[in-house]
Image (spheres, coloured by chain):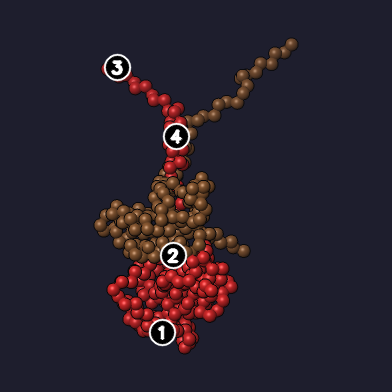
Chain colours: A brown, B red
């Protein structure tokens, strides 16, 4: 009887994982460059409205954020589902904006204070009433540079 | 001299470490890009100052109203499409035929360019308290779009390039010739309550 000896013991040869760290580091670098640190936890649902003529915010470090939208589901029992204002990490009212702006302005250096921008991240279904109130309060605090945060409109070409 | 070879460091755990860092970054960072419509609010009028109506000629103001049902009205026309509003705004701000009912122009000297008839038109946006934010942004967006269109036309006529491709000096000339006259007016309820 002929003996058919198999040369190797079967099974696929192991794939070299030597380049795995390199690949993961590459992904890591990509994320480090393209993302920014999360500053606050979102307490409100915000779907930004779409706009086609958007401009980029020049100095991200000089901007403060005001979120307006309906509270997320876990907070709806306590705060209802009417549009609310979120400053930093908590729900606030119109009157608190003054202190918020003052604190944010204080945190900046003297020369940068004029350049401070308030970025308004407002849900697209919010009614303008609360937005107008916020805008009036910002005018009163003379924080006049604002930005309506928006999404880039997806233009479908035919 | 017998030199002892340093033992090679095992790099096998490198992947684990970098995965750990990757996951950390995925958790703590956000990818929101900071884009939007930049605006400058008018300063609050001084309390001591008497509220005097700016004597702006009637023909120089375009009232843009958004009511509680997101209906838009510009001047006395009901707006049905974005394109219609854009064309209307462009016509209002350029006044190509020097019509009597559209804004007047004032010849101003612009440094580095010369005399140019600058339009005195102002667009005043008024909205109701129950207008949705998305509609408001949509209208604001159209206004910016119309302004960009006029600026592009002006740039192309003079330098053969779009506004965005001009040099810093040329851009400032364009900005002076075609100023951004969108006023965030004092809030008032557009829809009359009965």
Do discs 4 and 1 share a chain? Answer: yes
Closest to the camera, between mark 4 and mark 2, is 2
Query: Which residue reaches farthest bottom?
Result: B100
- Whether B150 is drawn above or below A89: the answer is below
Host chain of mark 2: A
The span from disc 2 to disc 1 (Cα, nearest Å) is: 27 Å
The span from disc 3 to disc 1 (Cα, nearest Å) is: 97 Å
Number of numbered discs present?
4
The span from disc 4 to disc 1 (Cα, nearest Å) is: 66 Å
Question: Marks 4 and 2: CB-CB under 8 Å?
Answer: no
- Whether A61 is drawn above or below B97: the answer is above
| Residue A51 shows up from this direction | no
Q: Nearer the viewer, residue A124 or B89?
A: A124
Do discs 4 and 3 share a chain? Answer: yes
Whole-percent x, y for residue B86 in the image: 52, 73
From the viewer's perspective, is B20 left or right of B82?
left
Q: Nearer the viewer, residue B42 or A75?
A: A75
Closest to the camera, between mark 4 and mark 3, is 4
Whole-percent x, y for residue B93 in the image: 45, 78
User: At 31% across and 71% down in the image, what residue appears?
Assistant: B47
Closest to the camera, between mark 3 and mark 2, is 2
The span from disc 4 to disc 3 (Cα, nearest Å) is: 40 Å
Label 4, residues with CA under 10 Å away: few <14, some 14-19, many ≥20: some
Disc number for residue B57: 1
Whole-percent x, y for residue B45 in the image: 33, 71
Residue to which mark 2 is pinned: A132
- Whether B9 is drawn above or below B98: the answer is above
Disc number for residue B2: 3
Question: Marks 3 and 2: CB-CB under 8 Å?
Answer: no
Q: Nearer the viewer, residue A82 or A52?
A: A82
Secondary structure category for the residue under label 4:
helix
Q: Quadrant of the N terminus of chain B?
A: top left
């Amino acid at each position: 009887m002929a003996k058919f000896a198999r040369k190797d013991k079967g099974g696929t040869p192991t794939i070299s994982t030597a380049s795995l760290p390199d690949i993961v580091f590459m992904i890591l670098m990509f994320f480090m460059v393209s993302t920014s640190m999360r500053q606050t936890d979102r307490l409100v649902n915000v779907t930004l409205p779409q706009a086609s003529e958007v401009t980029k915010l020049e100095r991200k470090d000089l901007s403060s954020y005001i979120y307006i939208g309906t509270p997320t589901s876990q907070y709806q029992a306590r705060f209802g589902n009417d549009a609310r204002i979120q400053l930093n990490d908590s729900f606030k009212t119109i009157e608190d904006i003054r202190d918020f702006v003052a604190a944010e302005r204080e945190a900046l250096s003297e020369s940068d204070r004029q350049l401070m921008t308030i970025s308004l991240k407002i849900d697209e279904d919010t009614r303008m009433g609360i937005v107008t109130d916020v805008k009036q309060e910002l005018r009163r605090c003379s924080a006049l540079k604002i930005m309506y945060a928006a999404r880039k409109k997806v233009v479908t070409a035919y | 001299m017998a030199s002892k070879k340093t033992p090679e460091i095992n790099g096998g755990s490198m992947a684990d470490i970098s995965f750990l860092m990757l996951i950390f970054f995925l958790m703590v960072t956000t990818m929101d890009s900071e884009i939007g419509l930049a605006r400058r609010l008018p300063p609050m009028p001084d309390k001591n100052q008497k509220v005097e109506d700016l004597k702006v000629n009637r023909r120089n103001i375009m009232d843009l109203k958004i009511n509680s049902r997101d209906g838009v009205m510009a001047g006395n026309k009901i707006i049905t499409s974005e394109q219609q509003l854009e064309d209307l705004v462009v016509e209002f701000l350029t006044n190509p035929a020097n019509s009597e009912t559209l804004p007047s122009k004032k010849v101003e000297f612009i440094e580095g360019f010369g005399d140019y008839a600058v339009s005195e038109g102002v667009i005043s946006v008024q909205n109701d308290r129950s207008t949705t934010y998305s509609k408001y942004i949509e209208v604001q967006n159209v206004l910016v779009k119309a302004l960009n269109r006029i600026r592009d036309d002006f740039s192309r006529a003079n330098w053969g390039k779009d506004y965005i491709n001009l040099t810093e000096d040329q851009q400032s000339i364009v900005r002076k010739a075609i100023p951004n006259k969108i006023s965030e007016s004092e809030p008032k309820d557009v829809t009359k309550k009965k």
